[in-house]
Image: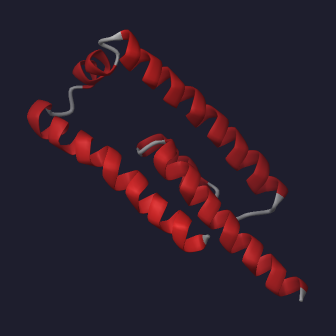
Amino acid sequence: MKYFYGILSILGTILPYSQLVPWISENGFNITQLIYEASESRIGAFAWLDVVVAAVVLIGFILYEGIREKMKYLWLPIIGTLTVGVSLGLPLFLLLREIHLEKSERRSI
């Protein structure tokens, strides 16, 4: 599963940025324009609100599960979620969790 989560973390970064980088090269860092275009239609607003809710839930899950499992580097998937999105934050957290669980199993043997 580590490789699966690792590949999804990479794709979860590349795919969203493959759309953002060309937009920024055309429009610059125009946050007002970005927000306008992202919420220009009801379906766009629907998608963004869905992403915002998913990001809040994910950050809560990262903190809860990470603290419960005494994981390190919880800030990485949180920063990933805030800078790229759930598409990076979730697989990155699951990758870190998988690595943590493997190490915990080795210690208990």
From this viewpoint, which residue is outermost toward the left?
26
State left or right for residue 76 relative to residue 67.
left
Name the residue rendered at 77%, 51% in the picture: 65
Displayed quadrant of residue 20: top left
Q: Position of residue 97 (x, y in %)?
A: 69, 64
Q: Quadrant of the C terminus?
A: bottom right
Q: Which residue is at the front of the view, 79 or 106?
A: 106
From this viewpoint, which residue is outermost toward the right?
108
State left or right for residue 103 relative to residue 9.
right
Q: Quadrant of the N terminus?
A: bottom right
Displayed quadrant of residue 10: bottom left
Q: Which residue is at the front of the view, 31 or 1?
A: 1
Q: Position of residue 104 (x, y in %)?
A: 81, 77
Determine whether 1 is above or below 44 in the image. Answer: below
State left or right for residue 66 relative to residue 35.
right
Q: Is residue 2 visible?
A: yes
Q: Is residue 73 visible?
A: no
Q: Position of residue 49 (x, y in %)?
A: 50, 21
Name the residue rendered at 38%, 53% in the picture: 13
Q: How many marks?
A: 0
Name the residue rendered at 39%, 10% in the picture: 42
Determine whether 26 is above or below 35 in the image. Answer: below
From this viewpoint, which residue is outermost toward the bottom?
109
Q: Position of residue 6 (x, y in %)?
A: 50, 67
